[in-house]
Amino acid sequence: MNSIIVYGSNYGTTKQYANELSRRTNMKVISFKKVNQQINDYDNIIYLGALYAGGVLGMSKTLKKLNNISNKKIIIVTVGLSDPTDEVNKNNIRNNIKNQMPKKFFEKAKIFHLRGGIDYSKLNFAHKTMMKLLYNAVKNLPKEKLTAEDRAMIETYNKKVNFIDFSSLDEIINEAQK
């Protein structure tokens, strides 16, 4: 099967996962910024994207370049700060993905979630400002109103944390090899 890994990463965590997945599978890996119409030559497309403000970085731009997905396997992998095993968090991510892609893509795609990391010292001004605004909006909420995403942001605010777990790629590799 002709396969490719495409990723969208701003600060490197998603790129680390993409490169490790490539190393383990011998699949070609490229940034979404370099994707062109040749993506249609691949039967198996794995998209890894960082989560930003509910969206998956670069996913929409990449999927728009696909002409016909009827004979393609599409795997979408999100990389975010909050716990990917939390059901409410997973449902929120899935709903955001659903709004970012055509229905036919969403129904066909296999979706996985990985936990990444953050280093506030490396964030650009816009992202630091956005995180500060989000933090200030949730830091005083009652505990019972906090989502997993809110709790993760509060716990990691202004810190450097890394939750990368390459063993979590095993499930994705199994799906890709089916």
Image (cartoon, rainbow, N blue to C red):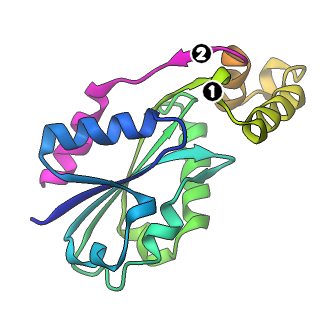
Provide the residue designation for mark 1: 122
Amino acid residing under circle 1: Lys
Q: Give above or below for 150 relative to 25.
A: above
Residue in the image at 51% along x and 59% along y: 58
**Dividing the image into 4 quarters, which one contains the C terminus?**
bottom left
Horizontally, is 41 left or right of 59 in the view? left
Bounds of the magenta segment: 158-178
- Image coordinates of residue 159 in percent, x first then y, are 66, 14
Q: CA distance from mark 2 to mark 1?
A: 9 Å
Q: Position of residue 93 (x, y in %)?
A: 57, 48
Q: Quadrant of residue 156?
A: top right
Residue 22: quarter of image: top left
Q: Earlier in the sequence, mark 2 or mark 1?
A: 1
Q: Residue at x 54, y 31 (%)?
A: 86
Identify the residue position indicated by label 2 in the image: 160
Secondary-structure class at tag 2? strand
Which label was assigned to residue 153?
Answer: none
Q: Position of residue 8 (x, y in %)?
A: 47, 51
